[in-house]
Amino acid sequence: MKRPDRLFRNIVSREGAYAWAGWCLMPFGWLYGLIASVRRRWYESGDRQFRLPVPVISVGNIEVGGTGKTPVTIWLANRIAGMGYTVSVVARNFGQRTRACRVRLDNDDVRNNFTDEVLLLAESLLGRSSVYSGRSKTEAATKAYRGEKPDIIIIDDGFQHMQLYRDIELVVLDFASPFGQGGILPSGTLREFPSVISRADHIWINRIPPGMSAEWIRRRVSDYNWKAPVQFSRVKHTGVRLVNGKVLSGIPVKTVLAFCGIGKPESFRNSLEEAGIRLEGLEVFPDHHVYSKGDIDRLREIMERTGGSALITTAKDAVKLYGIPDTGDILVQTMNLDVEGAVPDLMNDIQNSIDAHRKRNKRIGIL
């Protein structure tokens, strides 16, 4: 039987015999989109959203998986912290830990309780911003406020989390598929109708390939939202390290076998090839896959059979390898975001929001 994630990709891309399934599912997609629209309007009308005494910025998208929200969240948290503000980041956890808490990377047992995105946030922001996670983002945000009293809270993947009021909505679009593929779930990758982009305060177009311009996307986005400032980012290869943390000066092997469990695995392949890394192949696991020793053993067998000299994976996948024997020598691609566009407008809005909340809290006696 075909793996669910591969089946879904075939349906949304309308490949071969699966095209009919995608077309047949379109009425369910329209119904899903209608329900999402009604839900959003219900929360946004009246006073139904929970408000915190500090500004909340959401980094979200309109597509399921693969737009690079988490790297944008990390970049934004570091940028705000560099301005002298304290930042707490909140992300939903689908792992074993259900109650909201601060994520502390004390040992491998703690790592087993959280999903890869939560662990990547905690690892990347260690010492600069606190990270809170739980099944409920509202509960996690409340704990973050009570525990840290930060100047601002960033909600990772928060555009559809309507229970919590957000002061700034930042919507991330992927260059390759800014308006999704195949329509709305379950016939496509969209979570809501594209017109919901009109709710965004800022728009971020991510993963622009080298030598290409995102101007055509800016023009398309303006059909839905002509007021929101637009940021652009390119994913920049910065080097390679080992899972055990050792930074390498270069690729010490001729060819590598890549593996990942992310929303858009082809983006990983493209980034490696653009960096000049020669691949023997790419083994794709389901998004958020929890790796086992058996997975690593199988990957090593494939590597030896295909002639690869080492394994390489993403930073998001690497956080799930800690504690698994014989993974310390696996290569990890390190990356950064090269950001341009209306960044000053975004930073000014954030600073103004923080200042406004501070004045309000001082006026009503909240410390």
Image (tube, rainbow, N blue to C red):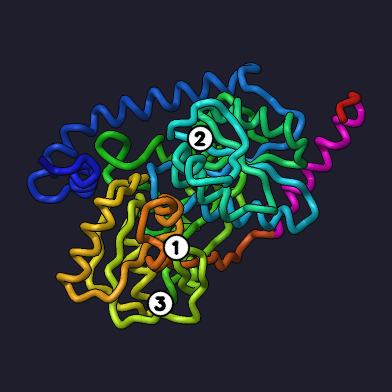
**Residue found at x 58% / y 58%:** 231
The mark that comes first in sequence, 3 or 1, is: 1
Disc marking residue 275: 3
Q: Position of residue 5 (x, y in %)?
A: 24, 43
Q: Which mark is residue 134?
A: none
Q: Give, as a three-letter code, the residue at label 1.
A: Val
Residue plotted at (86% across, 30% down): 361
Magenta-colored segment: predominant secondary structure: helix
N-term mark: 1 or 2: 2
Instruction: State which quadrant residue 190 falls in.
Output: top left
Q: Which residue is mark 2?
A: 92
Using the image as rendered, state which of residue 50 and residue 45 is in the foreground. Answer: 50
Label 1: how many Cα within 10 Å (few below 14, some 14–19, many 20+):
many
* 344 relative position to 272: left or right: right
SS of the residue at dot 1?
A: loop
Boundaries of the magenta span: 344-363
Q: Using the numbered discs, state the Cα–Cα distance from disc 3 to disc 2 in whole angstroms.
A: 32 Å
Q: Is residue 353 magenta?
A: yes
